[in-house]
Image (tube, grey):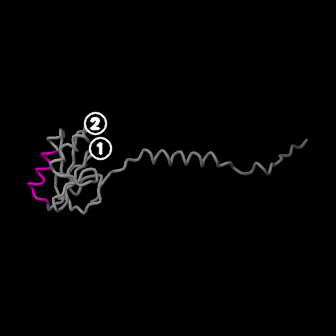
Amino acid sequence: MKYRQRRDEANDSIDISPLIDMVFILLIFFMVSTTFVKDMDLDINRPEAASAEKASNDVTRVYVDGDGAVYFDNEPVRLWALQGRIRDALSQTTEKNVLVVTDDGVAAGRLVEVVDQARLAGAGHVGVATRSEAGGRQ
């Protein structure tokens, strides 16, 4: 007796719907798990430093543009109000670090005032962003 294999024409294709579902699940996972860095759209020329280290993405950022204007949370803020705003932001995070992103043309006195306000607000470490600082435009 000879056995013949019957070929079922309907089962010749592969069902790829589980594969498509898995690709969408992976896409959603990577989109949710990606961290985004909030960097203001200011035209800042950062100073250079030979001892620069990469900064964490979880730091609180304060921006000082070339004219000496201070920005916090994408809004301009007066220097006398900066301490309270930083204190509020630091109370909501576990990292008590502040990064001052400043233009290289900012007067040293203005930079010291901003760093002083950050320290008075309770920041553990205050750093100044340079060109090789991570998480922002270069």
The mark found on residue 136 in the picture is none
Task: Considering the whole magenta stretch, tell me its main secondary structure.
Answer: helix
- Going 19% across and 54% down the picture, which residue do you hit? 70
Q: Measuring 55% from the left and 48% from the top, which residue is drawn there?
A: 24
Element marked by disc 2:
loop
The magenta-colored residue range is 106-117
Q: What's the amino acid at mark 1?
A: Asp
Image position of 72 (left or right of 14): left
> Could you tell me residue 69's position as x and y percent?
18, 58
Residue identifier under label 2: 94
Task: Count all numbered tags in the image, as a single digit.
Answer: 2
Which residue matches tag 1?
58
Q: Residue furthest left?
A: 109
Instruction: Give the image location of residue 8, x and y in percent.
Output: 80, 48
Left/right placement of residue 85 relative to residue 113 reads right
Q: Secondary structure at mark 1?
A: loop
Name the kind of residue labelled 2 in the image. Thr
Looking at marks 2 and 1 on the same chain, the residue that comes earlier in the sequence is marked by 1
Q: Residue 124: image x %, image y %?
A: 18, 39
State the quadrant of the C terminus: bottom left
Split into 4 quadrants, where in the image is the N terminus? top right
Q: Is residue 111 magenta?
A: yes
Q: Are marks 2 and 1 in contact (CB under 8 Å)?
A: yes
Residue 87, horizontal then vertical, whole percent:
21, 40
- Foreground pick, 102 / 121: 121
- Residue furthest to the right in view is 1
Residue 6, magenta (yes or no): no
